[in-house]
Amino acid sequence: MTAPADAPKPSNFLRHVIERDLAEGTYAQRHFGGTPGDGAHQSAGPLDPAKIRTRFPPEPNGYLHIGHAKSICLNFGLARDYGGICHLRFDDTNPEKEEQEYVDAIVEAVQWLGFDWETPDPDRPGEMRSHLYFASDYFDFMYRAAEALIEAGLAYVDEQSADEIRATRGDFGHAGTNSPYRDRTTAENLARFRDMRDGKLPDGAAVLRAKLDMASPNINLRDPTLYRIKRAVHHNTGDVWCIYPMYAYAHPIEDALENITHSICTLEFEDQRPWYDWLLDTLCDLGLLVQPRPHQYEFARLNLTYIVTSKRKLRQLVDEGHVQGWDDPRLPTIAGLRRRGYTPESLQLLAERSGVSKAGGWLDYSTLEIALRDDLDPKAPRASVVLDPLRLKLVDFTEVFGSDAHREPCHAPVHPAKPELGQRDFVLGNEVWIERDDFMETPAKGFFRLFPGNKVRLKYGYVVECTGCEKDAQGVVTAVLAKLVPDTKSGTPGADKVKVKGVVTWVDVATAWPIEVRLYDRLFTEAQPDAGDRDFLSVLNPRSKQVASAYAEPSLASAQPEARYQFERHGYFVADRVDHGVQRPVFNRAVTLKDSWGK
Ligand code: ATP
Ligand code: MG
């Protein structure tokens, strides 16, 4: 059993930390606006000590995926639940790979998931303040902080080659060795760092490193690199800078400047925490930041089977044409999941159900599908659609209704549990489409649908008795023949007196609406496509997309892009948000009604 969508949220260690900090007033003593005179502090807005602040800090170098959705739901969700603020911050400290296309897609994805970053502006009553930030806005501060570290004897310019730096860092079993440049004077370091900034050194000729401990058991503390030289045009700062801060240096500063209280990240950053703490405490000691500073908390990332989430691999799937773009409905990108038919609510449900823990693990892909079914079952309108059509001829139709042009009105509920949503109207004519596998000339054991001599109910219509079939020269069945059983029309008195074991979905031939249906399935055939040294492309599912020419009841003709339906007996489907239109109706299968994987 899965919990209903509106069940109270289970507690977790992050909630405990936040509740403790709120109760103890950990952040109540923060100074209004941080360090005076610093634009970055002002940009994050005045502090409200009663509020927590979290952030979602994507690097705009790709599309967001289901793992990011978890992080978004967690950070924005905690801020919402505790009356705080969550910042959307683009971590754009790496000038080479970042693009506006990705910035736009990320903004769209976070909004679509149901979150925003605006809060009432205390300075301008009635107006809103946006909490969308760019790390590159803090480059000036980061540079000043680097000079302050040099002046305090805590950073130096290292002119060893990248290979030498790597070789002298040591490893788990061996301490590193000090750089020959480690004991330069403060004045020399300052001059060289300014040379780096002023473009007097070529790319890669020098880096700025913190001066910590080359023998530390934590490799992250072995004089980490703070700045590198890179001549590249940055999407925000252009060519103002030819040195760029490293992520490990920039990220804690970004958090501090924005007055973040709880900086939540995934477990692989656990070993970085001592550095995070050292850097921020040191910058507080140097008077550049103020206590109380933010703290980092790590949780286990979301790992789902049957998908890949590495940005490199996703890009390869797109670039090599294994899928059709970043929003291909088979990709685990948020854009792809949306196009597939996933709802924001279903992804929020998955994020909640997957929990927050310190122990990593794999979540089965079916958990994602169950979240979507649980979300859509109570709200998706129903529709009759035949995916693999075979003609059924009602041989006594003219006799019963007086004319082969007669159209017998039938009705079905829009939703079986919600009469208030009304009914769908359609007609029964002399020929209807049924699923090809609803007929067997020689029935297999346990087959209760159409075979000669058997009676079934045409759902919301009549009971019919199969009388035979027609075949072509190759022996392929081209039509099924049946006759109506009198007085069995659904909804009329006594309709149930003829008992049948099989119910068949159908669509009237004359009024059917032809639609294209894209039947999507898992993109990979193995639960862990990139396990070990396997090439993940070798386990692509060749049947991950199949296209059916189907027939739908006429009520579907009014479907708007992104409208979701349950096609009875088949699953949940969505009108494609890109390709669907009245001229060319296109529906995607989001998920089957039951888990049929591997069967
Ligand atoms: P990379 O760093 O390899 O480019 P990334 O997935 O870490 O990729 P970011 O843009 O840095 O991408 O991620 C933004 C945020 O999303 C980070 O805080 C990260 O911890 C979080 N995140 C990424 N993947 C997952 C995941 N599978 N589960 C939960 N959170 C995730
Ligand atoms: Mg990252």
Image (cartoon, rainbow, N blue to C red):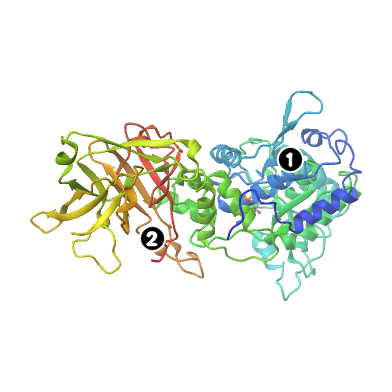
Label 1 sits on residue:
139
Label 2 sits on residue:
541
Q: Quadrant of the C terminus?
A: bottom left
Residue type (three-letter) at the residue carrying disc 2: Asn
Q: Are marks 2 and 1 in contact (CB under 8 Å)?
A: no
**Looking at the picture, does residue 182 appear above or below residue 53?**
below
**Visible residue check, residue 90:** yes
Residue type (three-letter) at the residue carrying disc 1: Phe
Left or right for 353, reference 590:
right
Left or right for 577, reference 45:
left
Secondary structure under tag 2 reads: loop
Answer with mark 2 or mark 1, whichever residue precedes in sequence. Answer: 1
Q: Which mark is residue 245?
A: none
Q: Quadrant of the N terminus?
A: bottom right
Nearer the camera: disc 2 or disc 1 = 2
**Visible residue check, residue 203:** no
Q: Position of residue 270 (x, y in %)?
A: 73, 62
Secondary structure under tag 1 reads: helix
